[in-house]
Image (tube, rainbow, N blue to C red):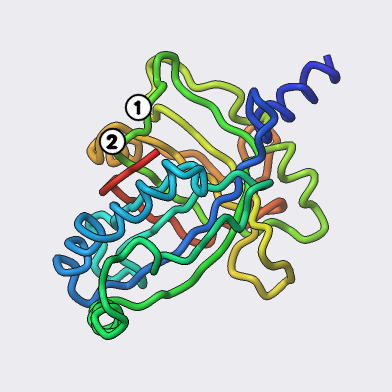
């Protein structure tokens, strides 16, 4: 039984073909959301489609924060790489047929309408999907977790064993678990993230309706293993693979 569980963990982490994915995440605060969205659709998407075709990038997604104007970021940009091929040509200048001056003016404009709030890297630890869900859902609920520094191993094993599958009648259609790998230390805001996937925003809202239970349920006290620092709901804006 232990050997089977270990095999499942390896498949979650590396995929069926042994490929280890690296997620490079950039959090953006757009001061002019509409203008930044236009750059995403008309400029950046073309760049990253070419990078994907050339094998430099596996996938590129952009997510937008839902119904929360006070959040400290508006967009989350996700670059997914094959770990063995990273970095794989990050010079985007080569995709533009323009003068150096035009290139400079474009970036001056972009920097006026948005700023980078943070950049982090994480890897896969595990996942689960409701039967028949073989697509990227529309709604991502990102949970920033700060694991107890003395119990990382226990926390990761507990998360994985707690979500082995998703019932067919669940409003949640998927789940992912990631470990941050770019920085460590007790002062970091988060060390792990979990993602709950939904087809619609209203499905997420419905999960908060009804009775609630205490933090300790069935002998499991999550507060001893990790702190849930923040939860952010985002909708899929664009996805290329």
Q: Quadrant of residue 66?
A: bottom left
Q: Where's residue 165, x and y in %?
A: 55, 21
Residue 101 vertical position relative to residue 202 in the rendered view, above or below: below
Residue drawn at x 25%, y 59% as measured from the top left: 40
Q: Above or below — where is 201 with respect to 23?
A: above
| Residue at 30%, 59% in the rendered image | 44
Q: How far is the residue under mark 1 from the one under mark 2?
A: 8 Å
Check disc 2 and report its element: helix, strand or loop.
helix
Could you tell whether 37 is left or right of 211 in the image? left
Q: Is residue 65 above or below residue 117?
A: above
Of residue 195 and residue 222, the one placed in the foreground of this image is 195
Location of mark 1 (residue): 171
Q: Residue 12's image quarter?
A: top right
Q: Nearer the viewer, residue 233 or 36?
A: 36
| Residue furthest out toward the left | 34
Towards the viewer: 78 or 147: 78
Residue 31: name its quadrant. bottom left
The numbered dot on residue 206 is 2
Q: Residue at position x 82%, y 58% from top?
A: 150
Q: Are marks 1 and 2 in contact (CB under 8 Å)?
A: yes
């Amino acid at each position: 039984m232990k050997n089977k569980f270990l095999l499942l963990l390896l498949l979650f982490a590396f995929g069926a073909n042994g490929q280890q994915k690296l997620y490079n995440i950039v959090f953006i605060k757009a001061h002019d959301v509409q203008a930044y969205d236009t750059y995403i659709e008309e400029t950046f998407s073309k760049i990253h489609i070419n990078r994907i075709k050339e094998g430099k990038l596996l996938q590129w997604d952009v997510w937008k924060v839902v119904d929360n104007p006070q959040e400290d970021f508006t967009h989350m940009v996700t670059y997914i790489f094959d770990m063995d091929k990273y970095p794989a040509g990050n010079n985007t200048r080569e995709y533009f047929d323009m003068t150096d001056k035009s290139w400079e003016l474009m970036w001056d404009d972009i920097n006026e309408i948005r700023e980078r709030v943070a950049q982090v890297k994480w890897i896969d630890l595990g996942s689960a999907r409701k039967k028949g869900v073989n697509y990227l859902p529309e709604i991502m609920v990102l949970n920033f977790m700060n694991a107890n520094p003395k119990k990382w191993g226990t926390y990761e094993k507990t998360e994985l064993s707690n979500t082995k599958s998703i019932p067919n009648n669940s409003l949640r259609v998927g789940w992912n678990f990631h470990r941050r790998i770019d920085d460590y230390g007790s002062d970091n805001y988060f060390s792990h993230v979990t993602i709950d996937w939904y087809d619609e925003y209203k499905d997420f809202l419905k999960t908060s309706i009804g009775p609630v239970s205490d933090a300790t349920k069935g002998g499991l006290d999550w507060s001893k293993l990790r702190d849930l620092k923040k939860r952010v709901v985002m909708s899929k804006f664009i996805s290329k693979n």
